[in-house]
Amino acid sequence: MTVTAADLFCGIGGFHAVASALGFESVCAYDSDKNCREIYEKNWQLTPGGDIEQFASESKVTVPPHSVLFAGFPCQPFSKSGAQRGMRETRGTLFFNIARVLEEKRPRLVVLENVRNLWSARHRDDWELIISILRDIGYRVSDTPLVSSPHRISPSLGGTPQVRERIYINATYVPPNLRDQFDLAAPSLDPHEAGLLWDPSEWKIANFIPTLRRRLNPELHLSEEEVIWIDTWDDFRKRLGGIGVRLPGFPLWLDVWTGELASDPSMPSWKRDFISKNYNFWTANRKVIASWLRQNQAVLNFPASRRKFEWQAGEMSSTWDGLIQLRPSGIRVKVANYIPAAVAMTQTSIFGPTKRRISTTELARLQGFPSWFSFEGQAQSQSYKQLGNAISIASAYHSVKAHIARDQQLLRRQRRQDIVDLVQSAPGNPFDRLDEFKA
């Protein structure tokens, strides 16, 4: 029997990759973004439908039958970077479209992905509502999600050097005649079964991405202005080191040192705390700061976000040895072992030794997409956006492995040994299939 899969909020096909690596056949996909649908079709030879609300409404569900449902439903209502209105926001209600599909089609397995913040105290009511709805429909699901990140998964299992913590909600349908034998409140998934054993400090991103030293799109290279910003702060770091002072762990704010920014009772407490720390730092190091400013007057005219510097690289000898992010909150530098979560081109990590941003090809690999995956014909900024919204393939893949380890007896009782066999026989590393697979 063929194990079929549906892909809701499909994006560019991260869950399609998971399905393919597990041996499932994807039969339908849906996404409201036209650009995502075009990239999905180009790579997977399956034409996605549009907005899921057109295919799964209160009155009608036209999604075809399937054995497994995947859905990375919109995270913006729960993300720390958004307003965090949760289910009260229109996009948050899209979970109910998933529920309508489940009510009508009863797929055996459900795998949902979202940001970790959905499971935070702020969104606990939303979380409990989602779990309650799944159980009301007849799904066995745990009270707690699997929290996974590719940088915690061994490279031998497809892990990649990127911090991308996401939650996975893995549910299995329980027919009415089995509900007295299988509790709808399932145990939590085992992190060990999900491959979450790797020591992140073992990563070295220069060894992972083979294209780092190749000549690539000139747009990836830093502008003269960006190099000046980084060089200026690197000069400051060197001056401090020359007198035996280590950079602090909190962000450095030049405007506090120049008197442009002072504490105010109306400010939030975190901001007053940073200002206080910066003032104390300036008091202790005013001579070296004054000398640096005299020889780097241009720093006073840097954009506001470039007058802030955050060092997270310990004893690293040069800013240019690390990973650099030009963030709205300032210039951040960390050790070049694993990158922060991919978000968008404006914050794409810069690999210091090459003085350029990580390419879309490299970023796709960090997300787990196969080497043949193509964004040809699309603006680079659009590709970064799509990758920033994509799932980590290794994290999703191993959530299914752990899911089957937990619920294999339930599936056997439903005569779905085929699902168990496919998942258990799938390789430990999804790349082993994906790099050879071409739809």
Image: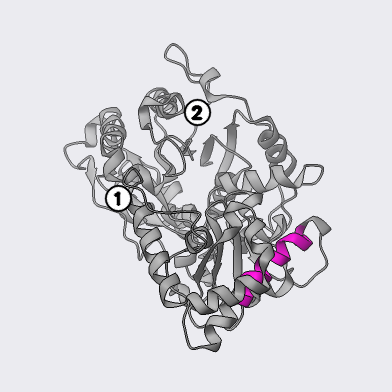
Front residue of this view, candidates 212 and 177: 212
Of residues 260 and 412, the one nearer the viewer is: 260
Asked whether 32 falls inside the magenta stretch, the response is: no
Nearest the viewer among 175 and 399 is 399
Of callouts 2 and 1, which one flags the residue occurring earlier in the amino acid sequence?
2
Q: Is residue 222 magenta?
A: yes
- Tell me the residue at 23%/32% (across/down): 177
Distance in Å between CA atoms under marks 2 and 1: 23 Å
The image shows residue 176 at horizontal and vertical percentages of 24, 30
Tell me: residue 206, above or below residue 148.
below
Structural crowding at the residue carrying mark 2, measured as other residues with C-alpha within 10 Å and reported as few (<14), some (14–19) or many (≥20): some
Is residue 397 at all visible to an observer of this figure?
yes
Q: Residues within 10 Å of mark 1 (few under 14, many from 20)?
A: some
Residue behind mark 1: 409
Q: Residue furthest top?
A: 59
Coloration mode = one colour
Q: Which mark is residue 65?
A: 2
* Magenta highlight: main SS: helix
The correct choice, above or below, for 268 with respect to 339 in the image is: above
Q: Please give the range of residues in magenta.
A: 220-235
The amino acid at mark 2 is Pro
> Dot 1 lies on which element?
helix
Q: Nearer the viewer, mark 2 or mark 1?
A: 2
Circle on res. 21:
none
Tags 2 and 1 touching, CB below 8 Å: no
Identify the residue at the far left of this view.
180
Residue at the image position 65 percent from the left and 50 percent from the top: 346
Point out residue 271 in the picture as x, y percentages from the top left corner: 38, 53
Quick check: 169 above or below 311?
above
SS class, disc 2? loop
In front: 301, or 154?
301
Q: Residue 27: where, in percent of width, then height? A: 59, 34
